[in-house]
Image: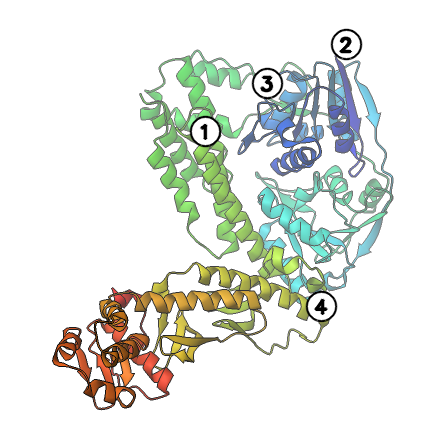
Amino acid sequence: MIKKICAVLGPTNTGKTFFAIQQMLKHKNGMIGFPLRLLARENYEKIGRKIGFSKVALLTGEEKIIPSTAIFFFCTVESMPENLAFDFLAIDEVQLASNQERGYFFTDRILNLRGKHLTMFLGSESIEKILRKLFKKIEIIKKPRLSKLNFYGYKNLIRLPPRSAIIAFSQLEVYSIAEKLKKFKGGASIVTGALSPEARNAQVKIFENGEVDYLVATDAIGMGLNLSIKYIFFTNLIKFDGFKKRYLTFDEISQIAGRAGRYKTDGFFGTTQNLKTINPELIKFVEEYKFNPIEKIFWRNSSLNFQSISELIKSIKKKPEKSIFILKKDGHDHMNLNILVQNHDVKKKVNCQKDLKLLWEICGIPDYTKILDEFHSKLLIKISEYMLSSSGYIPSKWFEAQFKQIEKFTDKIENINMKIAQIRIWSFIANKHNWVKDSIRYRDKIKKIEIYLSNRLHKLLVNKFIEITGKNFKSSNFLSKNQFCKLNIKNEVVVNDKVLAILDGFRFKIKHNDSFNLKNSHIYKNLTSSLNRISSDIYEDFINTSFKKITFDMKANIFWKNQLIAKFLKGDKMSNPRIKILHDEIFGRKNLELIKKKLYEFLFDILNKNNDYITQLDNYSKNKQFSPSFRAICFGLYENLGHSLKSEYKRSYEKLNALEINNLKKIKFISGSKFFFINICNHSIFLTTQMLISVYYKIETNVISKKKTYSSKYAD
């Protein structure tokens, strides 16, 4: 069958990726390469849900999920495998071949990867001229935009219309704008290239669900994010591209502006903040979907020579034969190689082609932090020394210690962003074949850390940049899924850093807060829903708690985690007091019964420890060899935990014989002024019985102790 090559070209939001995936699914198998990890994962999950995850694979630098039955592969361009054959193959955003930093990867894939039946390139019409020069018989399919894109003019930030995305070109500027929008518009979602897929999806979901009407993003929004945005506002047209500050090209601006509008819904673009106006020619360029043809793309030789270090470097520097190619001179792997071969300890370990290939692979470890060049160089040297040693592995103990440092708790957004960048490096390393023993376990652990950090980052972004309003609360899932309403270590129920209530045992004490109108039915309903969620967590925590964490005082108050939760009250007998749970309506009746059951178990746990005298009294009271008077006294003492009113059993006591009095003395029976009682040696049981006596007879106890509360741990 003839190998067909085609290109699907057009502006943003024209369904090119959707079209390609539909074509792929018509084939027996296929692979598609995306420019971003989050786009690869997004489409992997979307198709996985549609046809089953056993049929799809995900390959990125940091993730490799490859079921043995997978037939459709979703990859980043850099991670597309060259040793596998597919009927269908596609590469997305091929105009990025002109990108100075990553363009040579795209060029390499365009030149060298083919589907057995169909190869498809997706991208802007700006790449058409290059593709026609490379492939004389290529078929070009044009995808026209179905909606209009119009210039909206300048708008003050606080007057921006709903469903607007504001574009900034630094994280600092993104956060600054988001804080202003929180103050005047209730808040905004955040989308930057540094976000992990999990954090980015969570932020996008808030905007898509209408829980906020504004989104602040970097130019990362320009690729693959199809959102319900109606307006795009630029704050600047200058960005730092990793090398220098420069103006955005007309094509880059057009790509970003094209994210406004969806399908047949018109979109608008404009300016805000300090960008008061833009060139009329640029406005016309964007509105008419024009493009500047790309004249040259970046290239680097991929047929490398590993005979020696010098030959390898020479092959990397090989000049292209075609004039449309620009030699990529400063690839991060090339720069890393130059550093590593200058290290004597590393260089002396490279003794054969296999060693040199491994060293080159180590050079490809990306520095996602992009600000720690010296640290990254030291890391590569360390890994090289381990991998090129006799063991050929990175030591597990050292490896685990590195990413364990990243787990340490922080509440600063910038620190978590850095931690996510760092954990991505370790994820990349863990996904390398035979670099570390037990790599599958480490991949799982690292993924869990990344998900934890992503969730933490999302919550912090929500708390910092979104104000709670009645509108937010209208979403029934907003509080519970985003955990907007949370319980802090001070037992305060906090919403967006504002204390709404304080947890006191099993009671929520609502605080007056001018920022919230609790009479608003939406707010009250969803606040109650969130408190129900928190109360459910508290209930589970209590049911599973150790008896050692439950205490009582001599006034019959019961405490858990130093909070008053219940009281002992007089029951039908001394050993069986009633328990009153101090609660509000948030804690359900079923939960209260189980809480009460737990507290009775706590009480009986104390009473059943070191209670030989109770067993002896029970045996005496049932033994008919003794007189009825003796059995009556023993039963009274047994029923009341070793205590009985003297006035009730005085006549019985006077009828006892010498043997019976001697038996009582053996279990430390004492005749007091008002009570008959057993002299209990165990301090905790003594205090418990004294407390129960005071409850049953409603008397003040005279017990004095240095401790204010008591628990079952003192009964051993």
- Label 3, on which residue? 82
**Image height check: is 604 above or below 272?**
below
Q: Are the two marked residues, 2 and 1, in contact with CB atoms closer than 8 angstroms?
A: no
- What amino acid is at disc 1? Asn
Mark 3–mark 4 Cα distance, whole angstroms, equals: 55 Å
- Name the spot of residue 18 as percent of width and height, x first: 76, 33
Could you classify mark 3 by the number of other residues whose Cα lies within 10 Å: few (under 14), some (14-19), or many (20 or more)?
few
For mark 3, give the secondary structure: loop
Q: Which mark is residue 522?
A: 4
Q: Residue furthest top?
A: 1
Cα gap from disc 2 to disc 3, whole angstroms: 20 Å
Q: In the image, residue 684 lies at what x, y percent?
A: 26, 72
Q: Which mark is residue 2?
A: 2
- Give the label, 2 or 1, closer to the camera: 2
Residue receiving disc 1: 336
Which of the two discs, 3 and 4, labels the residue nearer the N terminus? 3
Residue shown at the point (24%, 85%) measured from the top left: 652
Other-residue count near label 1 (Cα within 10 Å), few / some / many at <14 / 14–19 / ≥20: many
Distance between the Cα atoms at labels 4 and 1? Answer: 57 Å
Residue type beneath disc 2: Ile
The way the protein has been coloured in the rendering is: rainbow
Disc 1 versus disc 3: distance between alpha carbons?
23 Å
Quadrant assignment, res 355: top left
Give the quarter of the figure containing the C terminus.
bottom left
At numbered mark 1, what does the secondary structure look like: helix, strand or loop? helix
Q: Are marks 1 and 3 in contact (CB under 8 Å)?
A: no
